[in-house]
Image (cartoon, helix red, strand yellow):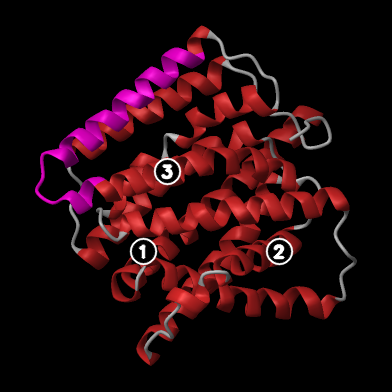
Amino acid sequence: MASAAHLDRTSVAFGVATLGIALFSAMDAVMKGLSIAIGAYNAVFWRMLVGLALSSLLYLTRRPPRPSREAARFHIIRGVVGSVMALTFFWGIARLPLAEAVALTFIAPLLSLYLAAVFLKEPVGRQAVLASVIGFAGVLVIVGARAGTPGDRDLWGAASVLVSAMLYAYNIILMRQQALVAKPLEIAFYQYLVIGGVLALAAPFIAVLPPAGQWPNLVFAALLALVSLMLLAWSYARAEAHRLAAVEYTALLWAALFGLVIFGEEVAVPTLLGAALIVAGCILAARTTSHPAPAAEAAL
């Protein structure tokens, strides 16, 4: 009876996480347009400020208690990582088809295996190494096809997305640990606060006030990100990270849909083949390795 209840709870968490990924994918599409129009830094910076204003209205009006020291540590670490992760990702998708960029980010769960070995002292077995080789082959297929197209900006875009994926691998570990010590709204508020603070350091030099016509898109992107962030935090607090890992792959379907409808981007065969190899590697890794311990058990 207990196992059936656990399975039902996991199914609900998986469904909510799927909705969160769909909204995040929609936000990616809006941010791609903004990054092309006003640049990646300004798109991310102003969206974060709008998100901070929205999350403040929801969070601070409840007079919440101060976060615990453990929660505050995760808020700061994830915020700093998230600021660089966001900039590199949105700079990259302004130069790549949306589905292709998302496919490259699928390498993150494989990279997280090695980060778990470093931070959580988990062993990396032969199966995990094989999974990584398969996943890396998928990356080579996608990037190799991109290398055959004209324009250096495309390769720089792919490199930028891969850097973001490396940071997201670390974010996967942080996400589960943070969700166990803080509530979704608190996570959303401090995510915006820390990332906004980090990006503000460069504001005097490169920030430009967006045109009036771009503000509705910035507000829409902030709303999508805020709701998505809370849905994912809610899900990761109710199910183990490895049980929700597969939900990340639905982002490719949404990216392909939004890329085609909004930007007229067709999904290339190498993108599908590379994504299939990366996902196969992730599935192999998930079946043969242990998974990150909860925050209470793991020292970061």
Q: Which residue is mark 1?
A: 29
* Mark found first going from the N terminus, 2 or 3: 3
Decide: few, some or many residues near mark 1? Use Cα within 10 Å; few <14, some 14-19, many ≥20: many
Decide: few, some or many residues near mark 3? Use Cα within 10 Å; few <14, some 14-19, many ≥20: some
In this orientation, which residue lies closer to the viewer: 220 or 210?
Answer: 210
Task: Decide whether residue 135 is among the magenta residues.
Answer: yes
Amino acid at circle 3: Val
- Where in the figure is residue 180, as x and y percent of width and height? 78, 45
Q: Say which residue appears at 18% left-offset and 52% top-offset.
A: 266
Give how far apart the Cα atoms at labels 2 and 3 are.
Answer: 23 Å
Residue 267 appearing in the image: yes
Q: Residue furthest bottom?
A: 212
Q: Residue furthest top?
A: 126
Q: Say which residue appears at 63% left-offset and 27% top-offset.
A: 116
Q: Which residue is mark 2?
A: 190
Give how far apart the Cα atoms at labels 1 and 2 are.
Answer: 24 Å
* Mark found first going from the N terminus, 1 or 2: 1
Q: Which mark is residue 163?
A: 3
> For this view, does 193 lie left or right of residue 45?
right
Amino acid at circle 2: Tyr
